[in-house]
Image (cartoon, helix red, strand yellow):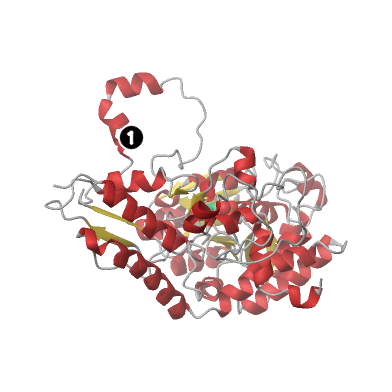
Amino acid sequence: MNLKSAWSRRSFLSSLGVASGSLLTSATAKAEGMFGKKPKAETKRLVDGNPIVPITSGLGSTGDIYAELGVKPLINIVGTVTVIGGSVMKPEVMELIRRGNEHFVLIDELEVAAGKFIARLCKSPAGYTGLVTGGAAAAMVVGYAAMMTEDLEERIKLCPDVATFPRNEVIIQKAHRYAFDHQIRQTGAKLVEVVTREEMIAAINPKTVAIHFTNIQSDRGQVSGPETVAIAKAHGIYTFNDASADVPPVSRLWEYPAVGFDMVTFSGGKDIQGPQASGILIGKEELIHWALLNMSPQEDRIGRCCKVGKETIFGLLKALEIFVNQDYDETLRMYDARAKLISDAIAKFGVTARPREFNPNALGNVTPRYSWQIDPTKLKITGQDVMQGLADTKPVGIGSFGAGAGGMRGRDPEAEARMKAHPELAQQRRRGNGPGRDPNTFGFAVWQLKDGEDQIIADRLVEIFSAAPKA
Ligand SMILES: *Cc1c(COP(=O)(O)O)cnc(C)c1O
């Protein structure tokens, strides 16, 4: 085999696993019995090429790794949510992951170099650098640890036992409290809740180390980002902006650090489409150095469990480079084209496309949402039925409607009594549908579709509407 020519872009999707290739060809898959039988080596796939190495025995040898484990894969019409896998990496990212795996290297040296690459790519202010973390949540852990421990080895080893540290309080607006403030509390820091600007200022005391800013909820709080930064600077304390889900638009990668936040984090595994367990921390050089001191590969510190490997670092850098250099208008046209393919396929059932909903300046998860209107005088099927039909699609589910995609919860001994007392809660949960939506509509996002999946969705919708009772 001529390796050079074999390393086309085409050869790569295969490195995502033969299964992902097979997922993309429902019609082809049915015709060729791909999900049941071992695919022939020469089987033509709609999306991409040849495996890096043929797997001839054990896991992966049937060509469908998900079926081998008895797990149903999903087509993502939901968003960049971790519970269903976030996003998938582009072939170029997979290639850098492969090459990153080729050598041993001093991880700390690689991290420092990667940080400079990130800072350059993200036009970070002078004196700032980057760090590849094991997700944005991990960036919060090592970032907050850094602010409290500085570079003092004794403190680094003590964290999260921070009671004796000079500064261990973090101010947060009440409206900014959220599931990820657990990662601040995890470092031992104590959260101090405030509502107004005056309360924020009054809460600052010699124990205060930082003010946390939850970007995606910032419209609910009374104190803006620039105000938060100004207050913190006036009192010699740090600021941290969690902007994990807040690109696109790409400009936020440079705008938020430029506001003056000491640290800003973005998820690597959301729309940046890097490795799922990666994140970016951009911040003042000194703070980033302290964050790395609190992190793997170093041992005996809180961030030892926030490990990133050389593969992840290279994968993230490539994904970020592609993300920064993309033509977003072109990306939007691609999303529109996917939605149009679906609209055209279902028009014959009297199902019509509704206007695209898109707020390019939304605080997070910026992407268009497409929806369609069912004509109840023609078909007796609700939007909810359609979404359920998509989710029930076999062998690859489309979306995750009602499939517990909120993640697993620990046991709650009170839950049964609560549901008995408030049966409407149980019903709401079963419906899994936001209030206020017209029951004759359905809709979703197409940004995380892989090539060819729009056609799979269109085909499945045709099946669903063909089987629907006529009104
Ligand atoms: C997704 C998300 C996180 C966590 O990011 P990971 O990269 O998955 O660790 C933190 N904060 C917000 C607001 C998020 O949306």
Q: Quadrant of the N terminus?
A: bottom right
Which quadrant of the render holds ligand 1? bottom right
Front residue of 231/394: it is 394
- Look at the picture and state if 238 lies above or below 405: below
Where is residue 37 drawn, in percent x and y? 61, 46
Q: Position of residue 57 (x, y in %)?
A: 77, 45
Residue that appears at 69% across and 41% down: 160
Mark 1 CB near ligand 1 (8 Å cut): no
Residue placed most toward the observer, 83 or 173? 83
Q: Residue at x 69, y 61 (%)?
A: 15
For mark 1, what is the residue?
430
**Can residue 108 be seen from the camera position used here?**
yes
Q: Specify whether 109 is left or right of 320.
A: right
Left or right: 299 with respect to 339?
right
Q: Which residue: 57% across, 40% down? A: 71
User: Hey, what amino acid is under mark 1?
Assistant: Arg
